[in-house]
Image (cartoon, rainbow, N blue to C red):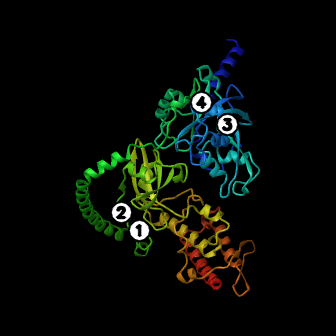
Amino acid sequence: MNPFLFMSVFLFFAIEIVGQQLYSGDLVMNCDNTDETGPSPAFLYTCNGLKSSCSAFLIFRTQPLYNTVAAISKLMTADPTELARINNIRDSNKILNLNKEVIIPVTCSCSGKYYQANTSYVLSMGENYFTIANSVYQGLTTCDSIQRNNVYERYNVPPGVKLQVPLRCACPTVSQTTEGTKYLLTYLIVLKDSIPKISKQFKVSSQNLALANGFSSGESDEISPNTTLLVPLRSEPLSSQTRTLGQKGSLSKKCIIIGTVTGSFLAILLCCLFVGYLLWKRNRANGGEKLKWVLPKDIQLGIASVDQLLKIYRFEELEEGTDGFSLQNRLSASVYKGSLKGRIVAIKQMGASAPKEVKILQKFNHFNLIGLYGVCEHDGACYLVYEFMENGSLKQWIEEKTSQESRSWNNRIRIALDVAKGLQYLHNFAIPAYVHKDINSSNILLKVLSSMGDEKHAKGKLNYLIDPRLQAKHALGFVIDQDELALCLLKLSIACLEPEPSRRLSINEIVSTLMKIQMDTQSTETMFTV
């Protein structure tokens, strides 16, 4: 066989194998990804197409500030005439329905390792690279790629700065072009989406859609909201293929039905509540006995009641509580804030790992661990309903540099102590013991900060602590050094990071040390009250 012919066939076959983009998954929710060893889907789509530049399309969903042709065109740096044409919009000033899918025509070009369509955005107060990528552009870009294209650190961008924003797009590969693909459309995944559902919407085969995004058999169900898929198209997308999310049936019809069956419903509800109360009371009695038998008496004070059974929610309840999983209620890629019967909750969409997480969380009942209220199953997806932490993550709290609370040593030590107590429970008292393996400031959630410290401290007014100098000024004018407290905390941190396990502190020693530091902190901060 001709060696040159063999090499040509081999190279063409190799191009076909790698001639696809990889699905990013939840990597795009992390702003600290790296591509030092090669292109990463956490940034943008790789330059592996037949052409270095091509026409491409994006799907954008309207939101309050971007609901006209003019506003969307400006946000995306798109031709307003072409945008109106492809979406069959005759009046460019018409205000479009909320969450309506809009087709965005772009020019997609290779820049370095990645394809991108270029636009720009002027930063407003309180925004950062992550919120721009996932709220403003809804996942059509990533915070890693925005940071790569701008000189500012992601949390130190002054308001009013014009940022360069690279949008996710790609050009067809050799194999896709051979099969008749002319365009690639970047589609934004939402709740309840699936490979077959998206394929049906754009009239493409599920197999081609899966292959275009690097899926192998059995993996295509694991797609997350607010991430993107590339849809291979033989022709331009049609406005008839777009949807308006969140459309529901007639409200008046529902009201009539509800009014008709109110009496029967109330009677059934009362019976169910009575039976439920009897079951709850019996389970509580059984659960209480088990709790006293399993755990030491001094630990019971830090453990919430284990007799609360998980509630099974209807999907309609979750939809109503989150306003149809609206953008306004979205907290992260797959987590939404909601209200269920007056209780504020966090609702998380899960994939195949949901049963495992439920099984683990059901065993943990401690004041310093987040509570799981219930679950819901709908269209193959699982939704977990959690206790809502109104103060967000520890990372957000620390980065609010203007916050009076973030300057309080008492608050800082209290948070560290609560985290340590939670880990102490997981390591020593959970059955079986559990190791988290991924503790960081992003997944430590804060509930109530105002109640930290005792009442006499809360009544006082703390002066500012100047952290760089570790000093604080008393109301009478003199300065008190805080370096001893900081040094104790530093020594504790170093001891926790000892490479040699035998020299590393146990979790019980850490809790004990933090309690001592907390007592010293409270006695010092008492001097700042006026």
User: Which residue bears the numbered disc 1?
Assistant: 304
> Residue 422 at x, y = what percent?
50, 66
Amino acid type of the residue tagged 4 in the rendering = Ile
Between 304 and 526, the one lying in front of the other is 526
Q: Residues within 10 Å of mark 4 (few under 14, many from 20)?
A: some
| Helix, strand or loop at mark 3 | loop
Residue 333 visible in rendering:
yes
| Helix, strand or loop at mark 4 | helix
Asked if 49 appears above or below 529 in the picture, the reply is above
Of labels 1 and 4, the one closer to you: 4
Tell which circle, 2 or 4, labels the residue nearer the N-terminal end.
4
The answer to whether the residue labelled 1 contacts the one labelled 2, judged by CB atoms less than 8 Å apart, is: yes
Residue 213 visible in rendering:
no
> Residue 323 at x, y = what percent?
46, 51
Quarter holding residue 491: bottom right
Tell which circle, 4 or 3, labels the residue nearer the N-terminal end.
3
The answer to whether the residue labelled 3 contacts the one labelled 2, judged by CB atoms less than 8 Å apart, is: no
Cα separation, mark 2 vs mark 4, equals 54 Å
Tell which circle, 1 or 4, labels the residue nearer the N-terminal end.
4
Cα separation, mark 1 vs mark 4, equals 57 Å
User: Which residue bears the numbered disc 2?
Assistant: 308
**What residue is drawn where x is 57% and y is 56%?**
438
Between 504 and 13, the one lying in front of the other is 13
Amino acid type of the residue tagged 3 in the rendering = Ala
Q: Residues within 10 Å of mark 3 (few under 14, many from 20)?
A: many
User: Which residue bears the numbered disc 4?
Assistant: 86
Asked if 426 appears above or below 414 in the picture, the reply is above
User: Which residue bears the numbered disc 3?
Assistant: 78
> Residue 375 at x, y = what percent?
40, 52
